[in-house]
Image: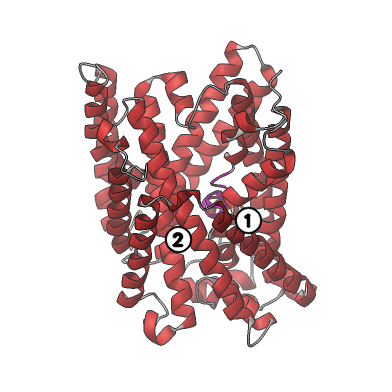
Amino acid sequence: MGENAKGVGLFGLIGLVVSSCIGSGVFALTGQLANVAAPGSALIAWVVCGLGFLFLALSLANLGAKRPDVEGIYQYASEGFGPFAGFLSGWGYWLSAWLGNVGFATMVAQVFGSLMPGVFATETGDPNIAAIVCVSVFLWLITFLVINGVESAAFLNAVVMVVKVVSILLFILFCIISFNAGIFTADFWGTMERNAVVMAANGVELGDVATQVTNCILIMMWVFIGIEGATVMSKRAAKKSEVGTATILGLVVLLVLYIGASILPYGVMDYADLVAAPKPATITVFDAMAPGWGGTFISIAIIISVLGSWLSFTMLPAETSSGMSDDHLLPASWNKMNAKNAPQMALIIVGACTQVFLIIAFTAADAYTFAISMCTVTIVITWAFAAAYQVKYSAEQHDVKNLVFGVIALVFQVVGVLFTGWGFLLLACLGYVPGFFFYLKGRKEGGAKGLSQGEKVACVVITILGIISIPLTAVGIIPVF
């Protein structure tokens, strides 16, 4: 029962998890973590995140196996808590997907600035107007390609996957060869010298170990976007029993790659040089280990990797909005297909939103961190609803083990965002405001008379929270500019 001899095997499912998660984040981890934590604290944060995402992965695997009829991760919210919850989950996933594109664009701009500082970077090393124009051209070229049906280019995705993994493994290998235990263990917990270094570079201290761990969490959560990959494909698995195994093994592979790429550089370069390295710091580290070619090699690998992920993340929001349109959570026009069977209107909306937010992001103090933080807090909404449905479904089935898994996953997602990204979550509320009008139109097209009283109250509360974020951002409480 439930077996499909011609379906996706265990190795293919593991590859799906790994390829779905690896994008630009792994290449940025080196510098991002160095600026907020010492190696000991970063390792603790990896353990916390690894366990949190393990329980989320197990929850998604359980739901995928027991509710294969549910298509689209946002539908868990609809099934468990009604259409408005489905909209909140789906709109969060939609926001997250194209906000991820903003992150990819800023990463490409940073790499261009590293390769050609006189052309694509300011005197301070930040991307300039030329970089913004260049990545904007990439944005619309990719949008045009997807509109014209290039989304089925499986060969391209395979090539990109190989480039990602090989370049990361090569970077880790060089780090192992160049590793200096003395540099790595000096002020391992960041309570003395490292605090002074970060204070001199950024004007803030690392803080105690708990503070450092907390500051790592949101950065780390970004690189696990896509952990639901095997679960989404569970109905195509050769053995549904392998979905959970594949998710766990995929998570282990990711942790090995992520920890190796982010922790080993602490023992390769002096900490002050690591903190001061231009973004992404991986380029500087590899160039130090392999002078003359290392920086260029990893720069090209990053561009190929990011463009591949950018292509996928252009399709994701369009696919999500199409499904939501079918469920009358968005207007039918969002699912209108062109001659190439692509949701053209949805793709153009995604492109326009990405373009506007891309310009806004480049006014931020750290455009990449701002973009990925917004991307992460919005997808956490989707993950949290899925975990909540796991709790509800398991309680109904009297499945204590999966009930516990769901509770841990839900607590991790909610606490992680509230402690590390509450300000960005308030900003994300602004992104829901226009969505309410589309939701109302979609519901009316589906035969509903309008919003229920509870939905109206929820819309007002979310709108107020979004408005509150504006003055908080202006005065610097929410650290954007």
Residue 421 visible in rendering? no
**SS for tag 2?**
helix
Q: Is 114 on the left or on the right of 196, as rendered?
A: left
Q: Residue 220 colored magenta?
A: yes
Q: Where residue 375 sits in the image (x, y, percent)?
A: 43, 49
Q: Say above or below: 119 vs 134.
A: below
Identity of the residue drawn at 32% across and 39% down: 337
- Look at 63% across and 84% down and name the residue there: 293
Quarter of the image for the C terminus: give it.
bottom left
Q: Quadrant of residue 246?
A: top right
Residue located 34% across and 57% down the image: 144
Residue position for label 2: 104
Q: Are marks 2 and 1 in contact (CB under 8 Å)?
A: no
Residue 334 in view: yes
Q: Which mark is residue 209?
A: 1
- How dense is the environment of label 2, judged by Cα within 10 Å: few (below 14), some, or many (20 and up)? many
In this view, 447 is above or below 412: above
Q: Against 137, is 390 above or below?
A: above
Q: Which residues are magenta?
A: 218-226
Tell me where residue 41 sits by quadrant.
bottom right
Whether residue 415 is in magenta: the answer is no
Kind of element beneath mark 1: helix
Of residues 470 and 113, which is closer to you in this image? Answer: 113
Q: Amino acid at mark 1?
A: Val
Question: What residue do we see at 37% from left, 52% from top?
Answer: 148
- The mark closer to the camera, 2 or 1, is 2
Q: Which mark is residue 466?
A: none
Determine crowd level at label 1: few under 14, some 14-19, many 20+ residues with C-alpha closer than 10 A: some
Amino acid type, label 2: Phe
